[in-house]
Amino acid sequence: MCRSIKTLRPPTTPEVTDEDVRAAALQYVRKVSGFRAPAAHNREVFDQAVEAVAAATQELLDGLRIRGSAARRHTHS
């Protein structure tokens, strides 16, 4: 679906930043909504969706247990 969203879990990406998570969330919301940049009247709901997807993504990444790898490293900014 979103080929420009990169894999954010180890070992593919050993260290993930908040910016990485937000960029993936933004790409997802852009794809689903069909808007690269929403009109002013859709900006608030668009931004809320990006934040919700970013939070869900971070929750997922924090909860994943990857066999055979060291503890997950995440850099919160």
Image: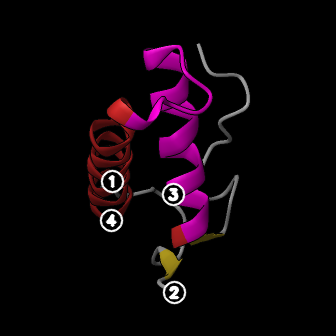
Q: Is residue 34 magenta?
A: yes
**Which mark sits nearer the N-terminus, 3 or 2?**
3
Label placed on residue 62: 4
**Which mark sits nearer the N-terminus, 1 or 4?**
1
**Which mark sits nearer the N-terminus, 4 or 2?**
4
Q: Which residue bears the numbered disc 1?
A: 51
Vertical relation: 21 (above or below) 17: above
Q: Which stretch appears magenta?
A: 19-40
Q: Which residue bears the numbered disc 2?
A: 77
Q: Nearer the viewer, mark 3 or mark 1?
A: 1
In front: 1, or 11? 1
Is 12 on the left-hand or right-hand side of 57? right
> Local crowd at mark 2 within 10 Å, few (<14), some, or many (≥20)?
few
Vertical relation: 9 (above or below) 36: below
SS state under label 1: helix
Task: Say what amino acid the circle numbered 1 marks.
Answer: Glu
Q: Which residue bears the numbered disc 3?
A: 21
For the residues labelled 2 and 1, the Cα–Cα distance comes to 15 Å
In front: 75, or 64? 75
For the residues labelled 4 and 3, the Cα–Cα distance comes to 12 Å
Q: Residue at 45% x, 56% y: name it.
A: 67
Q: How many marks?
A: 4
Vertical relation: 72 (above or below) 58: below
